[in-house]
Image (cartoon, grey):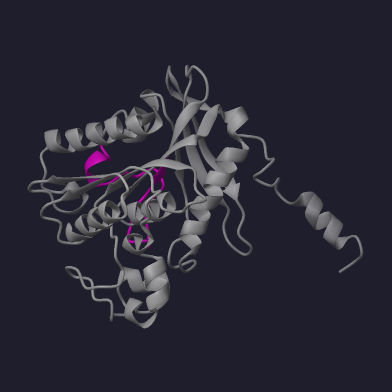
Amino acid sequence: MSATGPALRALIASPHPDTAPLPPAAHPAPDLRLLRGVPYGEVEGGRPLELDLWLPATAEGPAPLVLFVHGGAWRRGRRDDMGLRTRHWDPSPLARIAAAGFAVACADYRLSGEALFPAPLDDLRAALRWLGLRAPELGIDTARTVVWGESAGGHLASLLALDPAAPATGAVIWYAPSDLTVPRGPFDPHSATTPEALLLGAAPATVPERARAASPVSQAHRAAPPFLLVHGEQDAMVPGTHSEALAARLREVGAPVELRTVPGADHGWYGASDDAVEEVFAGSLRFARTCVA
């Protein structure tokens, strides 16, 4: 390579996310701005990490933030998907949260086929760092941040909320795993083929320290922000005992937590009535508001 090679490479590289111009905003509703595909991080040898931002257009002062984390068994999923029962909603659930006065960021994270734990958690930390850095121009207040996740995304959101260095002031967690160390329902910690094993890179029972680090029940502490845990009573994929165990542990250490169950609901609220799903969402939004008041 010539002497000018590295300088040219730096010159033609895309702008770093910390300083790159924000994309033009769309206006899906008169009171909303939407920025899609905003790069927030770079991973050497990997794809750019992006997020979408829903911003209330008429907020008085900086808006509190909801960081939404999608599910998909840590293996798949889309950043703007809040689950099976909300995909047909118009306005979308993310637009509804923004219309309630929140800025909403839904972030990509590396999936288990791309990188092992703690990579996805590191990515969400990077998203929060970027949002804090760009907060003045975005009009958001990251000191009032609620993390909201469903299924595998709820697991990551729990860990993020339990990170003392994260600015979370609340957590809304839907039907999420909380313990990767003991058998629950179909999960066998000795199997190397489960989604949990693919996340960790080995059967959880063979990497106990890593499994504990990836288990919210093992990370609970007294200074944790308020948690709302919501779980279907008939969940056959992630049994409700996950939320029960995390609620019990948070209470044990003296942290604030609410546990709500949904009768007749399987994973993703499958089997629940439309009214029940609407109430879960409305109750979750009410809880989020109390966390940023």
Residue 142 picture location, percent across and down: 51, 36
| Direction from residue 138 to residue 267 in the image, left or right | left
214 in relation to 202, above or below = above
Residue at 16%, 68% (x, y): give it. Answer: 185
Residue 105 picture location, percent across and down: 46, 39
Residue 74 picture location, percent across and down: 37, 61
- What is the quadrant of residue 220 in the picture? bottom left
Residue 264 picture location, percent across and down: 7, 48
Residue 183 highlighted magenta (yes or no):
no
131 in relation to 282, above or below = below
Residues 213 and 192: in front is 213
Q: Is the magenta stretch mostly helix, strand or loop?
A: loop
Query: Residue lying furthest left in this view?
Result: 264
Residues 292 and 121: in front is 292
State which region is magenta. Answer: 67-88
Residue 75 highlighted magenta (yes or no):
yes
- What is the quadrant of residue 212 in the picture? bottom left
* The N terminus, quarter of image: bottom right
